[in-house]
Image (spheres, helix red, strand yellow):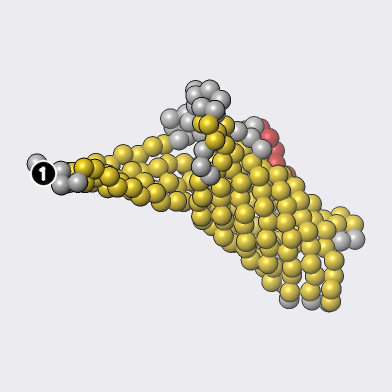
Amino acid sequence: MKKIFAIVLAAALFAGTNAFAQIYPGAGYINSTLSGQYNGNAITPEQSNGFYAGASYNVGLSGGLSVAPGLYFSMITNTQEGSGGVSGIATVNSKTVFTEMALNVPVMANYSYALTRDAKVFAYAGPTFQLGLSSKAVNNTNADTVIGSGSSNSTKDYYADGDYNKFNVYVGGGIGAEFAKILIVLGYDYGVLNIYAGSTENTFYHRANLHLGVGYAF
């Protein structure tokens, strides 16, 4: 998987040197869903939100057909809070913040249709290769009891602890429009690889991303 990621990244950078390539920097919003099962039981889908930023290189092939490799940074996060304890004796409050960062290399095939001289619509589809940079959950717990109070902090590193794979491959696509070099895109990608790398049997996790973004055509 590392070799595949390196080859795709090299191809993306090479495409950017093509004299006929058009550069498309862009950024946008991500809604990410983690679903699957743990020890044979379906988990409640976990929602995270975040952003992406980077650029693609749109290389024309024929007519409205083109290919666009790219390189993007993404970050998603979610916060979960809970409380419990025994009334009049103890109160326990917890807060966990999950944050994940990654580098993404999409290789999309595009087809565009011109509406006017300065406006067109397009559709795209293809794989995205992802290299995880960081995946951590930071927990803070505060307890108030009849004999005193205290707090504790802990960090779960999913990559270092061997619970998550750093590499993933998404397949997906989307639609978009370009007006006077301003792009608006809406897409969806599904992670085909099981990102769970732990030892619990009958466990698998898949991540899916819905994204909405804007860009500019140089």
Q: Residue at x 64, y 41 (%)?
A: 191
Mark 1 belongs to which amino acid?
Val
**Residue situated in front as seen by the camera: 101 or 5:** 101
Residue 130, position as x, y percentages in the image: 61, 42
Residue 210, position as x, y percentages in the image: 62, 54
**Residue situated in front as seen by the camera: 156 or 200:** 200
Q: Which residue is mark 1?
A: 146
Looking at the image, the residue that sits furthest to the left is 147
Looking at the image, the residue that sits furthest to the right is 63
Count the labels in the image. Answer: 1
Q: Is residue 146 visible?
A: yes
Residue 97, position as x, y percentages in the image: 39, 48
Q: Secondary structure at mark 1?
A: loop
Q: Residue at x 50, y 51 (%)?
A: 48
Q: Is residue 123 left or right of residue 106?
A: right
Q: Is residue 133 left or right of residue 59?
A: left
Q: Quadrant of the N terminus?
A: top right
**Residue situated in front as seen by the camera: 21 or 87:** 87
Q: Is residue 165 visible?
A: no
Q: Is residue 89 left or right of residue 56?
A: left
Q: Quadrant of the C terminus?
A: bottom right
Residue 16, position as x, y percentages in the image: 72, 54
Q: Residue at x 38, y 37 (%)?
A: 156
Q: Residue at x 54, y 57 (%)?
A: 51
Question: How packed is label 1: few (under 14 Cα within 10 Å), some, or many (20 or more)?
Answer: few
- The image shows residue 139, relative to residue 60, as above or below, that is above
Q: Quadrant of residue 53?
A: bottom right
- The image shows residue 2, relative to residue 181, as above or below, that is above
